[in-house]
Amino acid sequence: MDNTEKQKKNNKKRWFRAGSILCGVIFLGAFLFIGVYVGRQRQAEREYEAMREAQRIAEAEAAEEQAEAERRRREQEEAKAREAAEKKSDAPHLENTIDFETLQEENSDIYAWIQIPGTLVDYPILQHPTDDSYYLNHTPEGVSGLPGSIYTESVHPKDFSAPLTVIYGHNMRNDTMFGSLHDYEDPDKLEESPYVYIYLPDRTLVYQIFAAVRFSDAYLPAYCDYEEEEDFLSFTEELCSSEGNVNEEVEVPYGSRLIVMSTCIGSAPSNRFLVAAVQIDDYER
């Protein structure tokens, strides 16, 4: 083999080694590039995942804070509702000291007690189970004759849940029983003594007087259908337009629960003096 052929063969070997080295360098570079690229992607993914996790934590904390705020809001609303249920008006909450157990041992027909601060009205309320007129002329002890008792008729539920409950009592000359209701012929009395308290064994009902008027001797329990809005409003309008005194600031909307205290007018036997009040509050004992 001459020198020229050897030279050519050596050149080919050198080019082959150089190509091999170059390929190796390129492959290594590509491998390193891919490794760096994949590493960066994984790092970026970890960073995104960390961001997503931080966002999830933030959202969970925000949801927890919102739930806590909602819970506090509900608790506050419930507390206000309880407070409102216990105190629905500006009328003072008087202590219910009536010993119903002892009273009912003496007479089981005693089921409530009525008190009007600023008047002499401070009596048990009775209801006979079979004779609605019994307590017109019988005392709680069963003694016949005046002054009778403060009473309701059996048409009225004893929890005062009816739209209208009529309470009867004699107009005694010494202002006992319902005699002192005539104090409300003075318009100032509506402001001086506006509240009526009905004590029950488990609750106290509070009413505000809105009318003290002369009315007919119509039988009020059957006067109209107080469950019907038109009848109810017509009756209250008739009351408030009758001769007497009315507190127009007291609202008496349909759906209210009323008591009407009814007594005689000595000079007008065909009329009755009515003191009407609307329930504005109730509380436990």
Image (cartoon, rainbow, N blue to C red):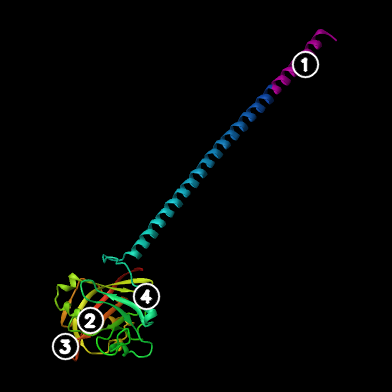
Sequence order check, earlier mark of 4 and 1: 1
Task: Please tell me which residue lies in front, 264 or 88.
Answer: 264
Name the kind of residue labelled 2 in the image.
Answer: Phe
Segment tinted magenta in the rendering: 1-24
Q: CA distance from mark 3 to mark 1?
A: 145 Å
Task: Identify residue for label 3.
Answer: 266
Does residue 256 lie above or below 2 as drawn? Answer: below
Dominant secondary structure, magenta: helix
Task: Identify residue for label 4.
Answer: 100
Residue 260 placed where, x, y %?
26, 81
Sequence order check, earlier mark of 2 and 4: 4
Does residue 39 lie above or below 104 as drawn? Answer: above
Residue 24 placed where, x, y %?
71, 22
| Res 250 visible | no
Magenta span has 3? yes
Task: Please tell me which residue lies in front, 259 or 176.
Answer: 176
Q: Which residue corresponds to the image point at 68% horizontal and 22% vertical from the top-left? A: 25
Sequence order check, earlier mark of 3 and 2: 2
Sequence order check, earlier mark of 1 and 2: 1
Instruction: For label 4, count other residues whose C-alpha is less than 10 Å away and answer few (under 14), some (14-19) or many (20+).
Output: many
Q: Which numbered tag is attached to residue 13?
A: 1
Quadrant position of residue 212: bottom left
Q: CA distance from mark 1 to mark 2?
A: 135 Å
Quadrant position of residue 196: bottom left
